Amino acid sequence: MDELPPSVNANLDICEQAVVSRANPERKVYSAMAGKTRVINQIPDDILNDKKLALAIELLPSNYSFEIHKTVWKIRQAGAKRVALQMPEGLLMFALTISDIIEEFCQAETVIMGDVTYGACCVDDRTAIALGADFMIHYGHSCLIPVGQTKTIKFNFDKETRISFVSTIQFVASLQNLVMQLKAEGYVASTPKSAPLSPGEILGCTSPSIDTDVIIYLGDGRFHLESAMIANPKCRAYKYDPYNKEFTQEFYDHNQMKANRQAAISRAAKASRFGLILGTLGRQGSPRVLQEIKEKMLKSNKEFVTVLMSEIFPAKLALMPSVDAWVQIACPRLSIDWGLAFAKPLLTPYEINVALKNVEWKDTYPMDFYAYESLGAWTPNFKPKCEKKQTSDRKL
């Protein structure tokens, strides 16, 4: 299965034999169709009013919402016997407490997955299944902090400014509410979409091209925002951090990044032997993309070796000095952000296609790794034009 893991919009995803549950902080009101009666996802009162469970939850920090009530309910619903917990390093300190709660109130065994996780592409359901888990909970890429302020936007921008709001999946629902409020007050606001992602959702490797004046990113850090900045070099970029409530203008050195990547591509174009790295961290790697690159290597009479890696480090690649250049099918940002740290060129699937002269270099660097409408078949979700047309015809 090469596809991007199912969108976090769904409460439950069935993936092979395991149930993968991604938590959202608030109870959601779902509407199957406009005009239909709404169905409320209601947690049973016996769980909500369980005083013993409430005391256990108090052991966790009050400024984070781990949705323990909902977690207990979903595990009981599924009848799960072994639950895998996956969370980024910053939340691992709470793993034992959550594990104890689940084991006491769900009578289920827990497995804490200690491997690093960087984002939604690292949902490691395959490892969970291999460990015998029948239920998996992925923490850290769902909303933990409530957002509901529009005053910052009104103070900094006039109503004629075209504003696009983007974020990671945890704040997408907040973006929709924010845009609705601003539109009601006369602002030109939108949440751009890069299918199959949700409107306003971006990844570190996937962002839409936007016809707008300003991009505002809701979230902490710069990693995901930089994806939108790379894809839209002419837009002014801002970040609102809901954790410290700071609003800042952000900048990116596009010329330096492109110069670095073009230099790596030029060096790789002269290489005789390539190393093709298939990332094995979560769902980062795509066997289909690997096969596509192998076929192009053969057509170009290039020698290559395939290597499987969960994490890619300069010292590890240095152990194979006979390789002249590397191509990594894992995270494109590894090459873009850290390519200079490697002694040999470390290209993305797009860049190796430029090096092999299968596609021309784009002045605006494409951030389309998980997009349907990507530049070519070297991305996991690429759909040929004929397939896109057939899908469109079926909708008609």
Image (spheres, rainbow, N blue to C red):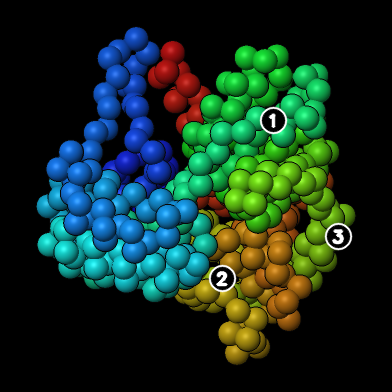
Q: Does 345 appear above or below 179?
A: below
Let me know if residue 263 appears in the view: yes
**Does residue 380 appear to the left or right of 187 in the view shown?**
left
Does residue 358 appear in the picture of this structure? no
- Which amino acid lies under the numbered mark 2 shown in the image of this protein? Leu
Residue at image position (50%, 29%) is: 388
On residue 151, the disc is 1
Q: Give neighbour class at mark 1: few <14, some 14-19, many 20+ (Cα, 10 Å).
A: few
For the C terminus, give its image quadrant: top left
Assess disc 2: are there few (<14), some (14-19) or many (≥20) residues with their C-alpha within 10 Å of its C-alpha. many
Proximity of marks 3 and 1: CB atoms separated by less than 8 Å = no
* 227 lies left or right of 363: left
Label 3 secondary element: helix
| Three-letter amino acid code at the position of disc 3 | Gln
Q: Which residue is mark 3?
A: 256
Name the disc covering residue 276, or none.
2
What percent of the width, then of the height, locates residue 310? Answer: 48, 73
